[in-house]
Amino acid sequence: MTARARPELRDRGQAAPLMVVVLLVLTLVVAATVEIGRFLDESARARTAADAAALAGAAAGRTEAAALAAANGGLLLSYTEQEPDGDSNALLVTVAVQVGRASQTARAERLVEWTAPPDATHN
C-alpha cells in the first residue's frame, strides 16, 4: 500500500485567487474590445459624414456641407474652398468632420465644363 502525499496547508485555496485574476483580465479584455469597436464605428461614421459634407459643399456651399454633416451625426469642424491651379472653372472643397471622438477629412471637386449652346438652326 502506498501512502498518499498530503498537500501542505500553504498549497490549499490557490484556485480562488487565480480565478479572480483570470476573471479580472477577461473583463479588461472585453472592455477594451468594446471601446475599440466603438471607436472604429465612430471613425467609419465620421468618414461617411465627411464624404457627404465634402460632396454637398462642392455642390452647394458651406451651409449644405454643415447640414449633411449634422444629418450623418457629425459636426463640421472646418471647411475650405480653393481653386486648384488657378482654374476658375474648378472648386476644391476640403472638410473635417467629427463624430464622437473620431474625426475625418474629405475632399471633393466641382468642375464646370463650358460647352457651346446647341445650334438653333439645326432643329
Image: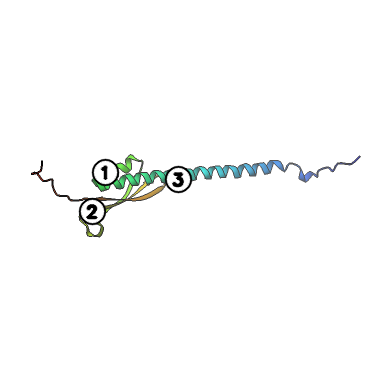
Residue 43, percent from left and from top: 42, 46
> Taking 61 as reference, is 75 left or right?
right
Q: How is the image coloured?
A: rainbow
Residue position marked by numbered label 2 in the rendering:
90
Q: Name the kind of residue labelled 3 in the image.
A: Leu
Give me the disc on residue 64: 1
Residue at horizontal 35 percent and vertical 51 percent from the top: 105
Q: How many marks?
A: 3
Mark 2 neighbour class, 10 Å CA radius: few under 14, some 14 to 19, many 20 or more? some
Disc 2 or disc 1, which is closer to the eye? 2
Foreground tag (2 vs 3): 2
Residue most extreme to the front: 122
What is the C-alpha distance between the residues marked 2 and 1?
18 Å
Residue at image coords 10%, 43%: 122
**Mark 3: which secondary structure?**
helix
N-terminal-most mark, 2 or 1: 1
Q: Write the residue at 20% across / 53% down.
A: 89
Considering depth in this image, is 90 or 6 the residue closer to the camera? 90
SS for callout 2: strand
Q: Residue type at mark 1: give it.
A: Glu
- Residue that badge 3 annotates: 40
Neighbours of disc 3 within 10 Å: few (<14), some (14-19), many (20+): few
Secondary structure under badge 1?
helix
* Of the image marks 2 and 3, the number of the one nearer the N terminus: 3
Please say if 89 is above or below 39: below
Image coordinates for residue 56, horizontal then vertical, percent: 28, 45
Q: Residue 12, image x and y in percent? A: 76, 42
Residue 1: quadrant of the picture: top right
Answer above or below: position of 44 versus 87. Answer: above
Q: Do the residues labelled 2 and 1 touch (CB within 8 Å)?
A: no
Label 1 neighbourhood size at 10 Å, few (<14), some (14-19), many (20+)?
some
